[in-house]
Image: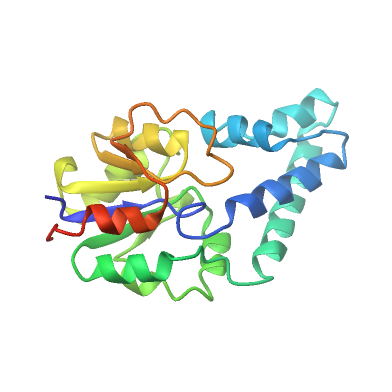
């Protein structure tokens, strides 16, 4: 049975994916680019391309794109600071599983928004570590983030379960040879999760499926 659980962050533990979408949509609208929720899902959560190429197609030069990126990041931090983004039921599920499994977070978030989002959640005490974007070279869907996490845990892939909510996260986990259960968020519900070991309706189902397991 599993010895550890690796958790995605945005859309799984905290409701920040929608805030990132909002910040990006508002920022690039200033240069005439419309970003729909479906565009965001495809460009960010499936292809991991982002949306700056859409701005370039509108004639925005590299310096302009950098300014937009800085503006988006500032707006994202403002939105995070407005309240506790913890998703419903997360605290109960994480605290229960932490008593039985080693746990860590593997996220594409940069350190500042990650730690700002968790400033009020109190969740991090249940995790051995969190891998943020600066701690690996190639982001999801590349398998590197999850391989690095397994190396830090000192565990084989067969001993580790991943909880994800996006296609790119699923592809990253499976390419690393890990078991991956997907709990879709509102932004990712229409995604193709072919290859997932399970697709669940809530984090509570994660706890239920592991109910008889022991670390």
- Asked if 132 appears above or below 157 in the picture, the reply is below
Tag count: 0
Q: Residue at x 25, y 47 (%)?
A: 161
Q: Position of residue 105 (x, y in %)?
A: 37, 57
Instruction: Answer left or right for 172 relative to 84.
Output: left
Q: Residue at x 44, y 51 (%)?
A: 107
Q: Position of residue 205 (x, y in %)?
A: 33, 53
Residue 185 or residue 72, whichever sits in front: 185
Residue 172 or residue 99, whichever sits in front: 99
Instruction: Answer left or right for 146 relative to 46.
Output: left
Q: Is residue 138 visible?
A: no
- Asked if 76 appears above or below 191 in the picture, the reply is below
- Asked if 186 appears above or below 203 in the picture, the reply is above
Residue 38, image quadrant: top right
Residue 6 or residue 96, whichever sits in front: 96
- Asked if 126 appears above or below 163 in the picture, the reply is below
Q: Residue at x 14, y 58 (%)?
A: 212
Instruction: Answer left or right for 178 relative to 118.
Output: left
Q: Position of residue 201 (x, y in %)?
A: 42, 47
């Amino acid at each position: 049975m599993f010895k550890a659980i690796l958790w995605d962050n945005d859309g799984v533990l905290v409701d920040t994916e929608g805030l990132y979408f909002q910040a990006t949509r508002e920022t690039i609208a200033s240069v005439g680019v419309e970003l729909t929720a479906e565009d965001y899902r495809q460009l960010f959560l499936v292809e991991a391309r982002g949306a700056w190429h859409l701005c370039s197609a509108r004639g925005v030069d590299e310096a302009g794109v950098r300014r937009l990126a800085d503006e988006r990041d500032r707006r994202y931090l403002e939105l995070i600071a407005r309240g506790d983004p913890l998703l419903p039921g997360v605290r109960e599920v994480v605290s229960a599983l932490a008593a039985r499994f080693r746990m860590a977070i593997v996220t594409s978030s940069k350190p500042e928004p990650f730690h700002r989002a968790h400033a009020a959640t109190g969740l991090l005490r249940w995790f051995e570590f969190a891998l943020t974007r600066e701690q690996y070279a190639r982001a999801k869907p590349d398998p590197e983030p999850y391989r690095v996490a397994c190396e830090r845990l000192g565990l084989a892939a067969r001993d580790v379960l991943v909880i994800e909510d996006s296609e790119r996260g699923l592809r990253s986990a499976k390419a690393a040879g890990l078991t991956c259960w997907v709990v879709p968020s509102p932004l990712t519900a229409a995604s193709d999760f072919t290859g997932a070991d399970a697709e669940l309706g809530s984090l509570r189902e994660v706890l239920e499926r592991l109910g008889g397991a022991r670390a």
